[in-house]
Amino acid sequence: MSCEKNTKRFIVSGISLPIKASGDDAFGKAEKALLKFFSREEIISLNISKRSVDARKKNDIQFVYSVAAEVRSEKNPDAKDLAKCGIAVSASAGIDVIPGTEKLNGRPVIVGFGPGGMFCAYVLAKYGYKPIVIERGSSVEKRIRDVELFKEKQVLNTESNIQFGAGGAGTFSDGKLMTRINDGLCGFVIETFRKLGAPENILYEAKPHIGTDYLVKIVENMLGELVSLGAEIHFDTRMDGISENLGKVKKIQTSCGEIDCGALVLALGHSARDTVRTLRKKNIIVTPKAFSVGVRIEHLQENIDRAMYGASADEGLLPRAEYSLSTHVGGRGVYTFCMCPGGEVVAATSEEHGVVTNGMSRHLRDGRNANSAICVSVLPEDFGGTVEGGESFVKNIEKRAFTAGGNGYFAPAQTVGSFMRGKDNKIGSVVPTYMDGKVNMTEIGGIFPKFVPEAIRAALFDFERKIKGFACDDAILTAPETRTSSPVRMLRNSETFVAEGFDNVYPCGEGAGYAGGITSAAVDGIKTALAIIKRYSEKTNRSGG
């Protein structure tokens, strides 16, 4: 008991080493720092906690390590002394809550099985709340078939596609886990993904990613875990309405019948426009917010590697190079988003007669091209400051892209040389990957309001200064990228997470306007679950609870 009590965990950070050095070299440096405070016998274990690439000096690229150390000792060194040696106490990634006492009159129902819905269900199930999850899209296996059919023959299933189905939009993506939010629950998310089958390196890479090839398996494993914990998952089940009295929802209407509901979590994702319209009619308060639209740019990955790493790119020791760029043009932010090394541009529409692009890559990132979105911020005043205005703004772009692509879900595309300098719009060394090359080489600026292509052109000049070759003539621009984030926010109490004007409705995740990406959506799902647990006892007065 005393040994367990005296076990401490630390992070030794800032360990810079040449790229040819090994993890053992990082352990050696970490141990040297720890020996200033503890004996060798007290250091129980060392593991890589994080590894990043420092490529600021291309002639001396370094890996920068953080090492997690487990120490068993009665000593308690001063935090300031530890910090001088690059050592900090490691925060726990666990969850510890005390359930509330209010009776939950029915099982919690979660709408949406993307990252927010999955992790909300996972935490609720772990604590015995036996949630019911409904997802308008299909299971992983059927969803894969539907996505392939659309890619090969342009037959769109509006309920099962890259946006809707098991795992949400993130299933067919790069699976990036990097996030700008600073929350201890991020560690819980990453550790859970690892337990569900993600590669081990997500535990320590500074920019962890899973890859769509692993994500489909992880979603299946999460499904099995939830069922084993007493949750119910219903695919191909769309929420069509709610029955509420004095702000309390007791039932929801679905495409497969009514479901009793003790608490309702709305983890819709950013593309469920029809569901948002339905909820607004039922007095869910929805407000417009800023979002972004733009294009996907593709380069040869080997050129990005050389631009970022110099001669070290040819040594085979570094990961595929990534970039993150931003600038301001006329008061608007323009930035790269969802960069997919060695990936492909995918067809991501969920509505008929519209074209949408997104990026995807597999875990090895071994494709020929790199791609990322170049996004321009869209402000509420650009679309009249209304929810309807924001929806129309996006939908009109997607429809114009459908027409420009030839009315068959082919995407409009243009070389950077043509877009920037009026050169011939012919495919060069960079071959478009959208639907295996199903693009229409045309002028893309006209599908957007004028400020969007103007901002992208100005940004490309700036990005070329930062990464040589970024605005090369044969880079490919494929349009449009319109689903970077939700254009709306469902208002909720910041402490209880309950929707304004309601008693037991919990907006959650990216579709509700509170996240942007896999990890942040998952964290918001966890926090929503914890808000429900803190309020309610897991015992219900309905069967199944």
Image: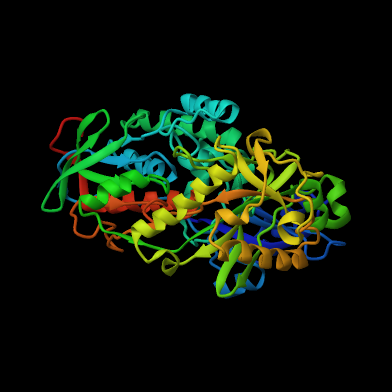
Quadrant of the image occupied by residue 198? top right
Position of residue 233 in the picture relative to residue 406 (left or right): left
Most foreground residue, 219 or 137: 137
Residue 326 location (% of width, % of height): 63, 66
Q: Nearer the viewer, residue 310 or 29?
A: 310
The answer, for residue 404, to whether it is visible in the render is yes
Render colour scheme: rainbow
What is the number of callouts on the image?
A: 0
* Above-or-below relation of 382 to 485: below
Q: Where 248 falls versus 449 (above or below)?
A: above
Quadrant where the image shows the C terminus: top left
Judge from the rendering whether residue 302 lies leftward or rightward of residue 50; answer left or right: right
The reply to whether residue 267 is in sight is: no
* 511 or 22: nearer the viewer: 511
**Residue 187: x, y in percent?**
51, 52
Determine the residue positioned at 44% across, 48% down.
522
* Rendered image quadrant of residue 487: bottom left
Q: In the image, residue 171 lies at what x, y percent?
A: 52, 38
Coordinates of residue 304 in the picture (x, y in percent): 77, 52
Relative placement, left or right, of 338 versus 313 is: left
The residue under the point 70% across, 63% down is 460
Q: Is residue 319 above or below residue 130?
A: below
